[in-house]
Image (cartoon, rainbow, N blue to C red):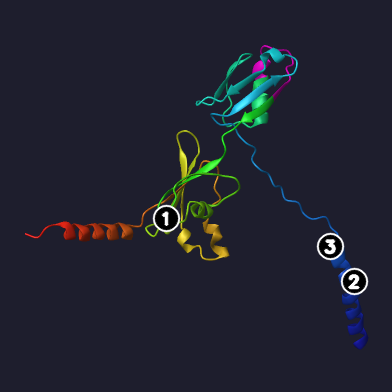
Amino acid sequence: MKRRVFSALVFVLLVLPAAVCAQDQRPPRLTNVTEDRYRLQPGDVIEVQFRYTPEFNQTVTVQPDGYISLGVSGDLKVAGFTIEETRQAVLRQANKRLQDPVASIVLKEFQKPYFVVAGEVAQPGKIEMREKVTALQAIMLAGGMKESAKSSQVVVFRKINSDTAEVKVLNLKEIRRTSDLENDLTLQAGDMVYVPRDKLSKVERFMRLVSVAALITPKL
């Protein structure tokens, strides 16, 4: 019996660590991390260069309706396209007039990404988005919430297209520890964070106005 226990102990001490080491030497599992490429917006300026027909080279501005006008192919809608998607679209159009065109697109000027914070914050306005930011961080960048804010119903408006927008209501009042951060939301460029006024603050404001009115009203 003792010999069996001793043999089992030897197995655990010698074989098991080797198996663990073998597992540690396996290549780590990779996760696909993709970042969205910049997409053209109205007001962006791009330079279109044709390698073999430089006479058609142009520097154009994306118009408010999302189109650019090219001498070689006419109007072309590019708003919402990446640079590579724009290059492919230009080639498809130019192919109607040129034989085997080769083109490159250079982004000369672009609209810097931003978000907007409005409502009951200390410094409402447009803020440049230099890195990933959540709704709560955006509010902090805007000076934080006022005492009159209703933090349990913060609204994020996200534009889907020219006609529709997605609306998300966040309860930031419940965020007190790290595990509560799932109630927060990572913003995208163009989002608007709106912090509404609390109903109680409206009542208090009304009461203050009534008190002031009572003081300045002459007694008969």
Which amino acid, by three-letter code, is at mark 2? Val
Q: Is residue 215 above or below residue 131?
A: below
Answer few, some or many: residues within 10 Å of disc 3's Cα (few below 14, many 20 plus, some between 14 and 19).
few
Q: Is residue 166 above or below residue 208?
A: above
Q: What element carries label 3?
A: helix
Question: Horizontal and vertical percent for residue 53?
Answer: 72, 13
Camera-side residue of 179 and 198: 198
> Which of labels 2 and 1 is toward the front?
1
Which amino acid, by three-letter code, is at mark 1? Gln
Question: Horizontal and vertical percent for residue 163?
Answer: 45, 34
Q: Quadrant of the N terminus?
A: bottom right
Q: Residue at (11%, 58%) from the top-left corner?
A: 218
The residue pinned by badge 3 equals: 23
Asked if residue 166 lies in the magenta stretch, the reply is no
The residue pinned by badge 2 equals: 15
**Numbered tag placed on residue 143 in the rendering:** none
Which amino acid, by three-letter code, is at mark 3? Gln
CB-based contact (under 8 Å), mark 1 and mark 3:
no
Residue 79 falls left or right of residue 28: left
Residue 212 falls left or right of residue 156: left
The residue pinned by badge 1 equals: 153
Q: Is mark 1 on a helix, strand or loop?
A: helix
CB-based contact (under 8 Å), mark 2 and mark 1:
no
In 3D space, how far apart are the residues under numbered discs 2 and 1 (Cα atoms)?
58 Å
Upstream in the sequence, badge 1 or badge 3? Answer: 3
Q: Is there any visible trace of residue 1 in the rendered image?
A: no
Q: Is mark 2 on a helix, strand or loop?
A: helix
Range of the magenta residues? 92-104
